[in-house]
Amino acid sequence: MSKVIELNHPLVKHKLTQIRKKETNTNTFRQIVNELSTILAYEATKDLEVTDIEIETPLVKTFQPELSGENIAVVPIIRAGLGMVEGFTNLIPNAKIGHIGLYRDEETKQPIEYFLKLPNDIENREVFIVDPMLATGGSAIAAIDTIKKYTQKPIKLVDIVACPEGIEAVQKAHPDVDIITATIDEKLNDDKYILPGLGDAGDRLFGTL
């Protein structure tokens, strides 16, 4: 079974509280999502491989670790996932960015893919799928389904707010995909919003409330 990593840090808890507040404006919301995404990127990449290389400091020659290869792709689920991309590229500027667009069919309630653009060397890259909310898990599962058609490399799902129902659904569908989240909230309500949550992340990121 995949790992589920929930960040447990005072700064993360504080920042989550700020974006949960309904009065938080778009600019502040966007900035804090960026900050949380950088922290999540730090956690999500902690097992990247490194190789010792010889370098010279101002004092001595030495062998020091360097990433074995920055073969990383960040794939946001449009549109809310776009707000998390910069958080990753703050730490990994050479990461390539893909995009996957999904919407929910109003009758079947199933995610429908309407856009896909991935790096042409995606098969060589570890993939981080990013989306602020892991609610029912439908969009995340659909995104993982699609990415697995193009690569056998590890895939990780990175969210800011998750809930037990979404985690369970993703683990059942893709038990090999690790989930990294800033918090696991209580549950979904009848409208499939996470409680206590923070509302619609896309609307709050882009000011379309």
Image (cartoon, helix red, strand yellow):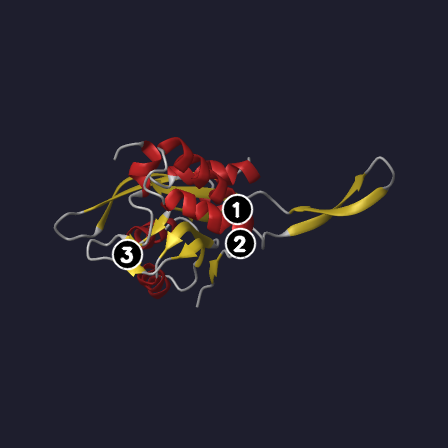
Q: Which mark is residue 39?
A: 1
- The structure residue drawn at horizontal position 46% and vertical position 48%, both measured from the top left corner, is 127
Mark 2 vs mark 3, foreground winner is: 2
Q: What element does badge 3 sit on?
A: loop
Mark 3 surroundings: few (<14), some (14-19) or many (≥20) residues within 10 A = many
> Which sits earlier in the primary sequence, circle 2 or circle 3?
2
Q: Is residue 90 left or right of residue 134?
A: right
Q: Which mark is residue 136?
A: 3
- The structure residue drawn at horizontal position 35% and vertical position 36%, both measured from the top left corner, is 205
Is disc 1 in contact with disc 3, using a CB cutoff of under 8 Å? no
Q: Residue furthest bottom?
A: 1
Mark 1 vs mark 2, foreground winner is: 2
- What amino acid is labelled 3 in the image? Thr
- What amino acid is labelled 1 in the image? Ile
Is disc 2 in contact with disc 3, using a CB cutoff of under 8 Å? no
- What amino acid is labelled 2 in the image? His
- The structure residue drawn at horizontal position 34% and vertical position 63%, both measured from the top left corner, is 164
175 over 89 or under it: above or below: below
In the rendered image, residue 168, in percent from the top left (x then y), is placed at 34, 64
Is disc 1 in contact with disc 2, using a CB cutoff of under 8 Å? yes
Q: Is residue 196 visible?
A: yes
In the rendered image, residue 169, in percent from the top left (x then y), is placed at 31, 62
Q: Is residue 172 left or right of residue 176?
A: left
In the rendered image, residue 150, in percent from the top left (x then y), is placed at 40, 48
Q: Is residue 106 left or right of residue 55?
A: left
Residue identifier under label 2: 9
194 over 72 or under it: above or below: below
Q: Is residue 136 left or right of residue 174?
A: left
